[in-house]
Amino acid sequence: MKLRYSQTSPYVRKVMMVAHETGLAGRIELVPTDVWAPDSPIVRDNPLSKIPTLVTDDGLVLFDSPVIAEYLDSLQAGRRLFPAEGPARWMALRQQALGDGICDACVLRRLESLRPESLRSADWDRRQAMAVARALDKLEEEVATLPPPDAPTIGSLAILAALAYLDFRFSAESWRRGRSALAHWFEQASARESFRLTLPPTE
Ligand SMILES: N[C@@H](CCC(=O)N[C@@H](CS)C(=O)NCC(=O)O)C(=O)O
């Protein structure tokens, strides 16, 4: 399998955590891909021009990260990261959506901050920052429903990737302030090997 990736993408990180948790990392050839480069080869595989993009051994091209993550999970015989059915499945998918949604808002903020100053919208930035703050407050409120460190699901991996992205790109904003239960959960859950093996570069 081939994964178009970048080391700084939180969606790639989630997928790579899944790859490590499922024991599949060794079967994935990593192809560094700059989606912003003119003529980026990503569009040959993914018309949406986004990473992560996975090309399976059968030549099927999969995107986006929830689809890739579920595909990898389907290849393994061990404990599933995507619960098969019932309330456990909906909770894991909801948690994944919350984690991915935090990443969506953060990535939009980051892109906005890279635009020329005269084109930036403070209102737009505030709207995304508020979405992140509300999502974090929701996680603090629901922390008892988050999977324990020794039984990860796609939900906990997505939330780990999102919180780590906040540390990576928005550390000055101190997401832990007023959210001590979530901070404690993160501290425990981020001790997993799959998290440590997927750290972004130090810039
Ligand atoms: N919903 C997608 C989001 C992926 C995404 O936005 N990736 C960013 C990198 S962090 C990207 O490739 N952006 C390029 C673009 O938006 O054109 C997923 O979960 O895979």
Image (cartoon, rainbow, N blue to C red):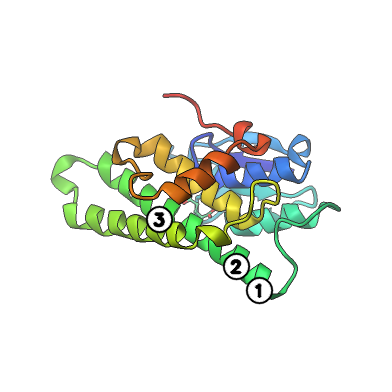
x, y percentage for residue 173? Answer: 30, 41
Residue 122 horizontal side relative to residue 4, left or right: left
User: Which of marks 2 and 3 precedes in the sequence?
Assistant: 2
User: Which residue lies under the disc numbered 3?
Assistant: 136
Compared with 201, 95 (above or below) is below
User: Which residue lies under the disc numbered 2?
Assistant: 91
Q: Residue at x 34, y 49 (%)?
A: 178
User: Which residue lies under the disc numbered 1?
Assistant: 87
Q: Secondary structure at mark 3?
A: helix
- Do labels 2 and 1 touch, CB within 8 Å? yes
Q: Which labelled disc corresponds to residue 125?
A: none
x, y percentage for residue 137? Answer: 38, 58
Residue 63 in view (yes/no) = no
Could you tell me which quadrant the N terminus lies in? Answer: top right
What is the crowding at mark 1: few (fewer than 14 residues within 10 Å), some, or many (at least 20)?
Answer: few
What is the crowding at mark 3: few (fewer than 14 residues within 10 Å), some, or many (at least 20)?
Answer: many
Q: Residue at x 51, y 50 (%)?
A: 50
Measured Cα–Cα span from mark 3 to mark 1: 22 Å
Could you tell me which quadrant the C terminus lies in? Answer: top left
In which image quadrant can residue 138 be found?
Answer: bottom left
The extreme top residue here reads: 202
Specify the amino acid type for callout 2.
Answer: Met
Compared with 118, 87 (above or below) is below
- Do labels 3 and 2 touch, CB within 8 Å? no
Q: Residue at x 50, y 50 (%)?
A: 49
